[in-house]
Image (spheres, helix red, strand yellow):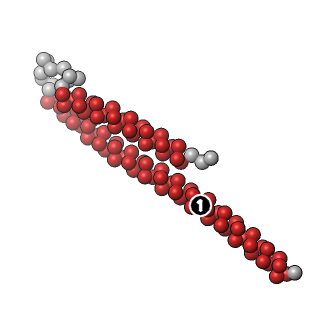
Amino acid sequence: MMVEKLKKSYDAGVEKIKWFASIFSERLKVEAAVIKLLKESGKLEKQRDLLLKSIGERVFELRGRADVDVFIDTRIRQALDELEKLDAEIQELKSRASEVGRVD
C-alpha cells in the first residue's frame, strides 16, 4: 500500500516535471526567435543611420548651390528610397517580433 502511494506520487511528480520542461522549452524557442528578429532589426537600424549620415553629408556638400534641389539630387533620392525600404523592413521585423513574443 505504501509503495503504491509512493509510486503514484513519484509518477505525478515526473509528469509535472515533463509538463514544465515542455513549456519551458517552447518558451525558450519563442524568446530565441524574438532575439533573432530584434538582432536583424538592429542591423537594419545601423544601415539606416549610415544612410541618414550620407544624406546629411550630401546636403552639406550642396549647401551653397541655389540651383540644386536636394530632393532631386540622385544620391539623396537613392538614399531616401533605400530609407523607405529599410523603415518598412524594420517595422515588419518589429511587428513579427511582437507577434512571436505574445503569449497565448
The image quarter containing residue 73 is top left
Q: Amino acid at mark 1?
A: Phe
Q: In the rendered view, does 2 fall on the left or right side of 102?
A: right
Q: In the rendered view, does 83 fall on the left or right side of 5?
A: left
- Image coordinates for residue 84, horizontal then vertical, percent: 33, 32
Instruction: Name, please, the residue furthest toward the right.
Output: 1
The residue at 19%/31% (across/down) is 75
Question: Which residue is disc 1 drawn over?
Answer: 24
Q: Relative to the observer, which residue lies in front, 91 or 66? A: 91
Q: Is residue 56 visible?
A: no
The image quarter containing residue 44 is top left
Q: Residues within 10 Å of mark 1 (few under 14, many from 20)?
A: few
The residue at 70%/66% (across/down) is 16
Q: Is residue 74 visible?
A: yes
Vertical placement of residue 33 versus 16, above or below: above
- Image coordinates for residue 28, horizontal then vertical, percent: 53, 58
Q: In the rendered view, does 17 fall on the left or right side of 93?
A: right
Vertical placement of residue 47 versus 72, above or below: below
Helix or strand or loop: what does disc 1 sit on? helix
